[in-house]
Image (spheres, rainbow, N blue to C red):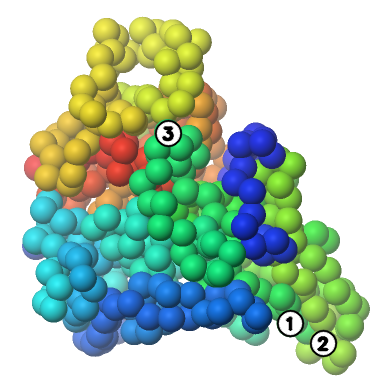
Amino acid sequence: MSTDFRLTISRRSFLTASLAGFAATAVRKPALATQQTRRFTLRAAPGRTRLVPEPHPETLVWCYNRRVPGPEIRVRQGDRLRIEVTNTLAEETTVHWHGVRLPNAMDGVPHLTQNPIAPGETFTYEFDAIDAGTFWYHPHQRSFEQVARGLYGPLVIEEANAPNVDRDVTWVLDDWRLDSDAAVSDDFGAAMDASHAGRLGNTVTINGRVPETFTVRSGERIRLRLINAANARIFALDFGDHTPRVIALDGQPVTPHAPAGGLAVLGPAMRADLILDFSAEPSSRLQLVDRAYRGNEYRVLDIVYGDTPLRDALPDRDIALPANPLPEPDPASARRHDVLFTGGMMGAMVERQMDLDAFGDAMRGLRHEGRGIWFVNGKAAEGHALDPFLTLESGASHVLQMTNATAFHHPIHLHGYSFRVISRDGKPTKHREWQDTVLMAPRERVEIAFVADNPGDWMFHCHILEHQAAGMMGVIRVA
């Protein structure tokens, strides 16, 4: 969100649409009011929903509580969550609470932090809402299919003193690969998807529907929470004359700023909180356009102004968010670790071009091990029960020096932590943003820093879910 976006997938390599026109824990707790325990239930099950308008039929999906997305879980910072998950699917599942700093046993990774939830069984997750922000939940068991079939939902943790806005709106963005009868295509795990850009769909939805319009009023201020739940699609949203201001990334506050190039960019699993002021005349109409893929820009929806303004002038209020209780890393004294991502189509060519021997000990004499397509420090993951490839000293600051020696973008996610993005290609980042998923461009080097204050074995992987399944995953141990 804070860097220039430059995705260059061509029209030829982009999937042609089938539906024409659709486009305990050591982390610190906040000192807030008396803690309340909030109880929720989720039931994972097959269901039907109307993703696309008539005359197309409803779509058979997998979903939580008969909804896509699943119910929005909304609590206050400092609350304790107790979420009972029942699995009525015909296969095992789990729930991962993406971006939430919680105890390792509650992280939802099968065979690493818990046994998967068998069909007919129930598992209860319980953790504290330490950080305010926009998060989400989804399976980590065969996620390349379970997420693509509709198993995900938003998790919002409200600040004690949130900015004063007229509306707080959540948009869960997704894309679906649908057949001509609106059925989810069952070509999961296709080799082309795994070795290229992942499972790109042909139908984009917001909150489980192909949208047409979003109605606003002149003078209105909206906090828009964006969540990218797609397997692989990157979004780059252009609001036209309405320049959004970013106030949070991946749930963590950031200095309010306009996004680079005016585009709100989210890789898979990433979130952004935007402040949007609607200043056009009543009855105006403008398009929201996704410009992520060169030559494949498309209209997402129309923003439509009502006939009556809400107020004559836009509000003049502070929009900055209060900081969350994150320990500040010290890059100067931090232990430094090299992480190299390789593999995929054209991977060998990129590795030769980048002269990896110049990048550090972890890259010298690189050999690929495992049967996967993608590799982390030369190894392809097979399943989640992995030995750690890094062990970090608990309580110390650490910097991961990550190199993307591939021809594709990768949104890299670390479980159990938020980290500061401190540099890109050797240049300090402007906002030193806290994130839990950082989008790396091809051939890019990114440094992230954090304090290893949450013990356990934590998953670390690309959140293009086909890349994860094809090897781009590892475990970082904090001990």
* Horizontal side, residue 471 vs residue 444: left or right: left
Q: Nearer the viewer, residue 266 or 8?
A: 8
Residue 214, by quadrant, is bottom right
* Residue where numbered disc 1 is placed: 215
Residue 227, visible in the rendered structure: no
Sequence-wise, the earlier of marks 2 and 1 is 1
Residue at image point 73% right, 56% down: 298
Q: Position of residue 403 (x, y in %)?
A: 41, 25
Q: Callout 2: helix, strand or loop?
A: loop
Q: Nearer the viewer, residue 223 or 6?
A: 6
Q: Amino acid at mark 1?
A: Thr
* Residue where numbered disc 3 is placed: 195
**Are circles 2 and 3 on residues that touch, CB within 8 Å?**
no
- Circle 2 or circle 3, nearest the eye: 3
Q: Callout 1: helix, strand or loop?
A: strand
**Are circles 2 and 1 on residues that touch, CB within 8 Å?**
yes
Residue 37, by quadrant, is bottom left
Q: Amino acid at mark 3?
A: Ser
